[in-house]
Image (spheres, grey):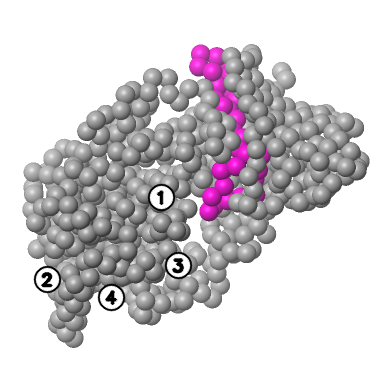
Amino acid sequence: MRTLFVFLAAWILLLDLTLQATAASAWVELPPARIKAIAAMLSPQPAGFGRPCSDRAFWQSPATLDRCGTALTAANKLLGETFPPWSDDLYLDFSRTGQRPPGEKMLAARKAWLQPLVVAECLENRGRFLPLLNQVLHAFASEPTWTLPAHDGGLGSFHRENYFVDLGAAAFGADLAEALYLLDDRLDPVVQQEVRAALETRIFAPIRHSLATGKGTYWLGSRTAPVQNNWNAVCLAGVVSAACAVLPDRADRALFIAAGEHYSRYFINSFDPDGYCLEGPGYWAFGFGHYAILRTAMLVATDGRLELFAHPKIKLIAAYGFRIQLANRLVPPFEDCRYGLPADPYVTAYCNQVFQFGIPGCATNSGVEHDRLDSLLMPVLPIAPLRSPSAAAGDFPGDHSYFKHPGVLVCRPSPGTNQRFSAAIKAGGNGSHSHNDIGSFVISVADQILAGDPGGPFAYNNKVFGPGRFTYKILNSFGHPVPVVAGQLQSDATRLHPRVTSTHFGAGGEDISIDLQSAYPVPELRSLVRTMHYSRTGPGAVVIEDQVAFSRPMTFAEGLPTLGSVKRLDASTLELSLGGQAMDVTVETPDGFELTSERVEELGAPAFTRLGFQLLKPVRQATIKITFHPPVK
């Protein structure tokens, strides 16, 4: 039966390559001349990251041992364990319940065996891990699908009817291809062919079909429907890396590399002109980190002749990882970014090295995605810096960053002072991971975010990216530090275009004013302007001031989320504390306010307290000022 399977797989592969050869001019957006030019850059044989197991000088080098040495300990433990079984029931759980963890944990438990076993065999070169590797690789080729359950809506992949290349399949396909490249002829030939056939049917054939028809793979984007999220970079990085590592035909490899070069421009175009990431700091690291993997795969394949980072906008996107930071490498958790997340140390280090930004404290030799086998070897590849290095950035990123296009301001303490406050505020900047958060802000003291935006989910379900998304308080404006106007929350932020009405950057601090009126479906609302003032005087302070006007008296309330402890000091002042840091919050309203408090815990995110400051009576116009300042001794 296995021999028949191998024969059929080989026949399918040959048929597909034949069809490709006869339809070489049929790729929707890829000029045949460009594919031919890239083919001329490629070596006759495919190559992945690093060197095959047979290259003992590479695998015994200090750099490789330093990067990969821990794999031996992990792989030795696996020799005495049972490989986690595939479960149809767990995979299908999402289709029944809409919950992602059961199926994804099952897949992750199985995939976690691949990297340590492959790397350990390459390091040791004694064949001890090969029997288990053959067993595991056969299991991967035999399981129904590599597509994540949440992305297999019609179960076409599960039923082996219509494979869809998603985030999971693309990344895992790259891992399997890299394993074949590294282990080469050490694997059982039958197992090796099983994996190659599975790669063909589940990864390469579906993408070729999309390249020829423009259909079936929405994350590629097109001239008429460019993508707006990280899927493009993540999936292209996986598909192109896999193609470079295993496809024997040079023209075939060139097709996928040309697709990576061309279609990744839609990912780059999704960033604002100043490099701002509409999906937030967390997804910048995920998406742009994989774009760096895509860049590396192309450099390896073309011996450094195809450079994705040559595009002038790439430097601005790379700089975002530094410019969005508060103090202590914290980032404001805007959009679906997890609360407390630091700036990704690997992606920022990679950007610092490639563009020579001169940021102190960054590692000089780092990969960008440790869960992937190919990128594990990135730091030992001598290709990171640009051939024409950028000039050093001097005092970049400075004590504040302003992204003009979305209206996002980030303020950090002045060097050499005792100031400890950082702050960030956003007007727009809402992409596919949008929250209803026009005017949202965060305030941090040293290494703790004490007030403001509580960040995005830690877990997704089937409602989060559907019509029920904004039923969650953590995603709608109730869970953000923005007003509730006449009892109304904000409208869908992706359909709004808020205006920054003024900015001022001076020695004493920074100011920004944002028009929030369009965010609220309240006909009586005549104006609502939010101003943030970041003071650099003395120990520093941050002031949020809202000026509101109605055509007739209406209710108005402020919201302030915090993950810290709350202590009311007097009628207008609260103390917030968390992780050894503290600050006072003074609220000034025309006639006092009613303080409300609600605990919110949703979508696996840390529970937070949503403080509400409700004006005591309806107002026609009012000014509300919230000052964040050091505790009064």
Query: What residue is shown with label 1?
Result: 267
**Residue at horizontal 37%, vertical 76%?**
162
Cα separation, mark 3 vs mark 4, equals: 20 Å
- On the image, the x and y values in percent for residue 367 come to 30, 42
Quadrant position of residue 314? top left
Total marks in image: 4
Query: What residue is shown with label 3?
Result: 151
Q: Is 100 one of the magenta-colored residues?
A: no
How would you rate the neighbour count of disc 4 (Cα within 10 Å): few for under 14, some for 14-19, many for 20 or more? Answer: few
Quadrant in the picture for the C terminus:
top right
Q: Specify whether 471 is left or right of 622.
A: left
**Residue at horizontal 28%, vertical 64%?**
27
Query: What residue is shown with label 2?
Result: 189
Mark 3 or mark 1: whose residue is earlier in sequence: 3
Q: Nearer the viewer, mark 2 or mark 1?
A: 1
Q: Are marks 2 and 3 in contact (CB under 8 Å)?
A: no
Mark 4 or mark 1: whose residue is earlier in sequence: 4
Of 505 and 117, which appears nearest the observer?
Answer: 505
Quadrant in the picture for the N terminus:
bottom left
Q: Nearer the viewer, mark 3 or mark 4?
A: 3
Mark 2 or mark 4: whose residue is earlier in sequence: 4
Helix, strand or loop at label 2? It is helix
Span highlighted in magenta in the image = 411-439
Residue 324 disc label: none
Helix, strand or loop at label 4? It is helix
Amino acid carrying mark 3 in the image? His
Amino acid carrying mark 4 in the image? Ser
Query: What residue is shown with label 4?
Result: 142
Helix, strand or loop at label 1? It is helix
Q: Specify whether 50 is left or right of 274.
A: left
Q: Is residue 495 visible?
A: yes
Cα separation, mark 2 vs mark 1, equals: 38 Å
